[in-house]
Image (spheres, rainbow, N blue to C red):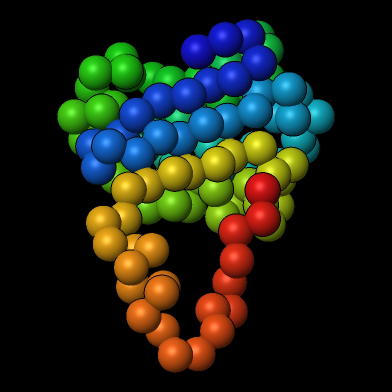
Amino acid sequence: MTDNILEFKVRSGGTITIALDRCVECETKACIEVCQAQGGPLVLDDERGVPSLRWSLAEIERGGCVECLGCELDCDLYGRQAVTIMLPLERFDEYLDSLTESVVYEHKR
């Protein structure tokens, strides 16, 4: 973690990264609302006005984050597009290569 990036590992081996500089200007804090509804680790750092973690990194990696993807989705829809979730998907590229029709969604970050 740095002053501008909040990054933590989750149980699947994936990583959640939040660009905190974008969160300062966010009026909705949508990621926090959806995370708290799921019992997840994000809380608001009232002093800085950005997301922070209510548990240790080790607790979160052991399963404190349920990996619902809600923080990224709600941030993209209602916030400042500050959350990126990268999850390991075994054989996903192989699956995509096997498709006979084109893929509708392409990740362009």
Relative horizontal placement of residue 21, taking residue 72 as reference (left or right): right
In the picture, measured across the screen, residue 69 lies left or right of residue 60, that is: right
Residue at the extreme right: 25
Who is closer to the viewer here, 46 or 8?
A: 8
User: In the displayed structure, does residue 40 sit left or right of residue 25?
Assistant: left
Residue 38 makes an appearance in the image: no
User: How far from the left and from the top, in percent, is residue 66?
Assistant: 29, 45
Asked whether residue 92 is in view, the answer is yes
Q: Compared to 12, does 42 lie above or below?
A: above
| Residue at 33% in and 68% down | 94
Q: Position of residue 15 (x, y in %)?
A: 40, 35
What is the quadrant of residue 106 in the picture?
A: bottom right
Q: Which of 55 and 101 lies nearest the eye of the viewer? A: 101
Residue at 52% over, 31% down: 17
Determine which quarter of the picture holds residue 12: top left
Instruction: Classify 106 as above or below 88.
Output: below
Q: Nearer the viewer, residue 65 or 89?
A: 89
The picture quadrant where one finds residue 2 is: top right
Residue at 59% from the left image edge and 52% from the top image edge = 74
Q: Can you give x and y, in whole percent of width and height, for residue 92 in the image?
A: 34, 64
| Residue reaching furthest to the bottom | 100
Q: How many marks?
A: 0
Whole-percent x and y of residue 79? 71, 45
User: Residue at (80%, 29%) from the top-left corner?
Assistant: 25
In the displayed image of the protein, which residue is found farthest to the left? 62
Using residue 94 as the reference point, say whether residue 101 is left or right of it.
right
